[in-house]
Image: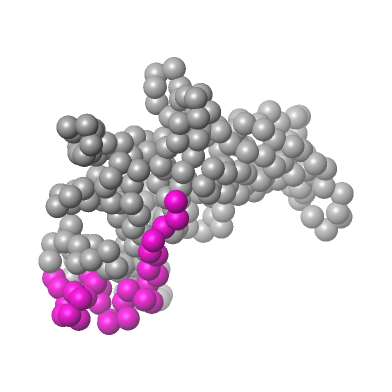
Amino acid sequence: MKPKLLLCLALVLSGGLFGCSTAPSGVLSKSAEGKLFSNQEAVCLKSDDPSRPWILKYALTEDTVNEGELFVTVHSRGEVDSYDDLSKWRPESTAAIYVKAGDKFELLKRLSTDETYGGAYFLKPNIIQATVTSSGGDSEQLIQITEVIYGTGHFTKEHIFAIHGTRINGSKFTDFNLEEVEFIPASESYLFGKDEGFKWESDTLTDYNLSFTFLICNLSGKDFKAIAKVTGTYKLEQKPDGKLRIIMDKFKREPITDSGS
């Protein structure tokens, strides 16, 4: 199941809008958060500071497996009062997950970035299908929102959710809700040898394909040179308490012999 629509900042804001899309007629709307004009335009997000409007960065829409329609948005805002005082630069990013079932339009989840390490931002959201290995091959629809910590280049935090609904009268679904899926990076499950640590990790989640790559470095050296590469796959499993978890499944370790690595 592929996303029907993905709008980038340049496309959505071609009319010079901040935080809201134009209505189909091209008229600026200042409606409250939660107003949706069409499947081809984004949800408006009001700002508590008129000088720092929210800018739409990504908008994704896709049918759910439960006869609803998902909307996932990412907005961001930042400010530089003075280039001589970058402490006044206050970047922020927020992501939201909505569902529309019939005429009902509901905000299910809003995420704010972690400010602990000086701020973060969200990447393009992703909606995929994945098989639950411990439940007879059942499929789950997952929403992935990746958070990147500013200044780290690669340090990320995954926010993954499964969407569920309650069946009414044997056919229609209602009362949609999100279940947060525990995500354990492969580098946290791998058993490293003496004086070994991980240097870099990349996780790729696509339809029915959850994979990873990370490098192993020698901690006893001065340059933390990469000595091996580990590739493999994750599995989506149901824990004894019924909740979902993504954890390392299979892996392969290969030495790095290139002196330039």
Q: Judge whether residue 8 is colored magenta.
A: yes
Stretch in magenta: 1-30
Screen quadrant of the C terminus? bottom right
- The image quarter containing residue 73 is bottom left
Q: Is 208 left or right of 95, judged from the image as shown?
A: right
Image height of 86 relative to 260, above or below: below
Magenta residues, dominant SS class: loop
On the image, the x and y values in percent for residue 132 come to: 49, 31
Residue 120 appears anywhere in the view: no
Instruction: Residue 227 in the image: state x and y as whole percent.
Output: 80, 44
Q: Is residue 56 visible?
A: yes
The residue positioned 41% from the left and 57% from the top of the image is 3
Query: Closer to the camera, 57 or 199?
Result: 57
Near-viewer residue (135 or 206): 135
Residue at 31%, 36% (x, y): give it. Answer: 164
Q: Quadrant of residue 31?
A: bottom left
| Residue at 77% across, 49% down | 225
Viewer-nearest residue: 175 or 196? 175
